């Protein structure tokens, strides 16, 4: 872990240095059995590392961060009307998720969070990622709490460290790993529902039923029906304890009713207000299981291989023994089957589904981390017993192991992928170049941009607040715009063939800046 790397900016380096000091304080307090202070500084460590991730890319990433950023920005003006083209001034078919007017391609909760961040702290790439920074830090705490309840305090602590040093989560926070903020929010709320279930079954306090229902509803409002995952595990738990005595399922029915109260209003509202867009979005979502939507297909072993990227190579080879160890060490044996079953179900479900994307299985990350942490703790106990360590030496040994876990944060890989301090990163250079062009445009609010390369019209709209399109207006669109008193601005290029009606119009603006990137 090389902190003083000249490929990181000053702000990024400060976040890393701060996170190291915070983590050392957490370890010191942990060794002194000051649990609350130890976890407080572990959460602060997560906030700093997550902030480092959020600062990595000073631009909007292409899949799909730029779309989410634009819709969230538009939501600031009308929270109940998610739009991509906030001003669909050109007469054309807004009939795809990447060029729609009302944008129901994703559920709205994570977009509302971003819009709130924009409203409170201003519009920037960092404030776009701020909700992820906070959710990622809270995830460390609930991972700690869940691991502690299920196995022991050490497992909880190890779980927290593994979550905050997870490179995959940092890539989601940075906006680079598809589908970034959407998947991070989905992971967060599903994890909250699982944590609430664990708290309920260990404490039997009825208010946790309410939280299970709320958080499951929030999960649905991030990414649809897989947000009901907790009920799959809960029913398995009930079958083990209460068989099929329906009166004993009252708590599940109450929680599910709360979930419906949370999630259904948005579905009903959009169905009644935007029926065509609602049905199109519903149809597209339903196709993911039976068809490879937009070419997202892969082999049956795709998600098993993905374990290496998401959790590390060692996890890939130790997952089965880790599950066995977790089952043997969990403090409530009845809880083991439903928790493991949720992980297995998600991997099986998305393996069977035809559409495959890398982050579909990330939603069970917290449980996987607890299982792996339990395995690490088992190995530690074995070694400490064999080496006959004193209690003090045991604490030192545990501290060394936790520091090694933190150092699993692959800064070399992050630097190679995200560094922007030289021109060797073509992707970063391209996105920064385009951003600078869009931000410096000084045009009237009645201007419409055309011939924006590929889908970079999304960034153009975000940075310039002007409607933008990737084509040249035809004669009918041109006349319609003139009737609306709009000014036409066209990004010039060597390949551009300018129609006669544009050539003869002296009010047409030609922008001699080259947009680089993908078609």
Image (tube, rainbow, N blue to C red):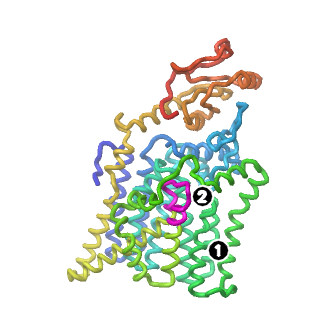
Q: Percent position (x, y) of residue 226? A: 60, 64
Looking at marks 2 and 1 on the same chain, the residue that comes earlier in the sequence is marked by 1
- Rendered residue at 52%/71% (across/down): 342
First to last magenta residue range: 346-362
* Placement of the N terminus among the 4 image quadrants: bottom left
Tell me the residue that label 2 is attached to. Answer: 289
**Helix, strand, or loop for circle 2?**
helix
Q: Nearer the viewer, residue 219 or 308?
A: 308
Q: Which residue is drawn at 35% across and 69% down?
A: 318
Q: Give the image quarter of residue 306.
A: bottom left
Which mark, by number, is residue 210?
A: 1
Q: Residues within 10 Å of mark 1 (few under 14, many from 20)?
A: some
Q: Is residue 45 visible?
A: no
Q: Would residue 409 appear left or right of 128 to someone viewing this image?
A: left
Which sits in the foreground, 283 or 204? Answer: 283
Residue 357 inside the magenta-drawn segment: yes
Observer able to see residue 109: yes
Task: Please tell me which residue is depicted at 56% across the width and 85% down the height of the picture.
Answer: 240
């Amino acid at each position: 872990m090389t902190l003083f790397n000249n490929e990181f900016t000053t702000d990024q380096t400060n976040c890393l240095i701060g996170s190291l000091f915070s983590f050392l304080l957490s370890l010191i307090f942990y060794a002194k059995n000051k649990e609350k202070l130890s976890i407080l500084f572990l959460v602060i460590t997560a906030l700093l590392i997550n902030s480092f991730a959020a600062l990595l890319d000073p631009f909007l990433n292409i899949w799909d961060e730029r779309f989410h950023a634009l819709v969230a920005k538009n939501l600031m003006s009308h929270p109940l009307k998610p739009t991509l083209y906030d001003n669909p001034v050109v007469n054309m078919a807004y009939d795809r998720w990447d060029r729609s007017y009302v944008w129901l391609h994703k559920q709205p909760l994570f977009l509302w969070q971003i819009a709130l961040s924009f409203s409170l702290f201003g519009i920037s790439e960092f404030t776009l990622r701020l909700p992820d920074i906070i959710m990622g830090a809270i995830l460390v705490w609930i991972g700690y709490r869940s691991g502690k309840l299920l196995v022991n305090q050490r497992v909880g602590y190890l779980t927290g460290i593994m979550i905050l040093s997870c490179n995959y989560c940092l890539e989601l926070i940075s906006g680079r790993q598809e589908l970034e903020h959407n998947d991070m929010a989905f992971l967060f709320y599903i994890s909250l529902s699982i944590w609430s279930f664990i708290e309920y079954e260990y404490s039997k306090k009825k208010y946790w039923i309410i939280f299970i229902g709320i958080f499951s509803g929030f999960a649905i409002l991030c990414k649809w029906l897989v947000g009901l995952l907790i009920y799959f595990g809960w029913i398995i738990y009930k079958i083990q304890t209460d068989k099929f005595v329906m009166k004993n399922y009252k708590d599940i029915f109450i929680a599910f009713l709360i979930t419906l109260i949370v999630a259904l209003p948005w579905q009903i509202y959009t169905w009644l207000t935007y029926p065509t867009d609602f049905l199109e979005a519903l149809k597209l979502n339903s196709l993911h299981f039976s068809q490879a939507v937009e070419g997202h297909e892969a082999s049956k072993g795709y998600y098993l291989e993905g374990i290496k990227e998401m959790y590390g190579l060692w996890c890939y080879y130790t997952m089965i023994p880790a599950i066995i160890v977790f089952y043997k060490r969990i403090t409530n044996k009845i809880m083991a089957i439903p928790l493991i079953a949720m992980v297995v179900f998600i991997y099986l479900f998305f393996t069977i589904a035809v559409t495959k994307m890398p982050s579909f299985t990330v939603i069970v990350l917290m449980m996987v981390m607890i299982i792996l942490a339990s395995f690490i703790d088992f190995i530690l106990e074995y070694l400490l017993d064999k080496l006959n360590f004193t209690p003090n030496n045991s604490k030192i040994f545990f501290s060394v192991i936790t520091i090694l876990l933190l150092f699993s944060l692959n800064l070399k890989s992050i630097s190679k992928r995200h560094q922007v301090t030289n021109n060797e990163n073509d992707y970063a250079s391209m996105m920064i170049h385009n951003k600078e062009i869009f931000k410096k445009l000084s045009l009237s609010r009645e201007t419409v941009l055309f011939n924006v390369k590929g889908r970079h019209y999304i960034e153009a709209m975000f940075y310039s607040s002007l409607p933008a399109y990737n084509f040249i207006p035809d004669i009918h669109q041109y006349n319609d715009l003139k009737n609306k008193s709009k000014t036409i601005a066209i990004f010039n290029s060597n390949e551009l063939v300018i129609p006669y009606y544009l050539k003869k119009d002296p009010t047409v603006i030609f922008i001699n800046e080259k947009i680089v990137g993908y078609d």
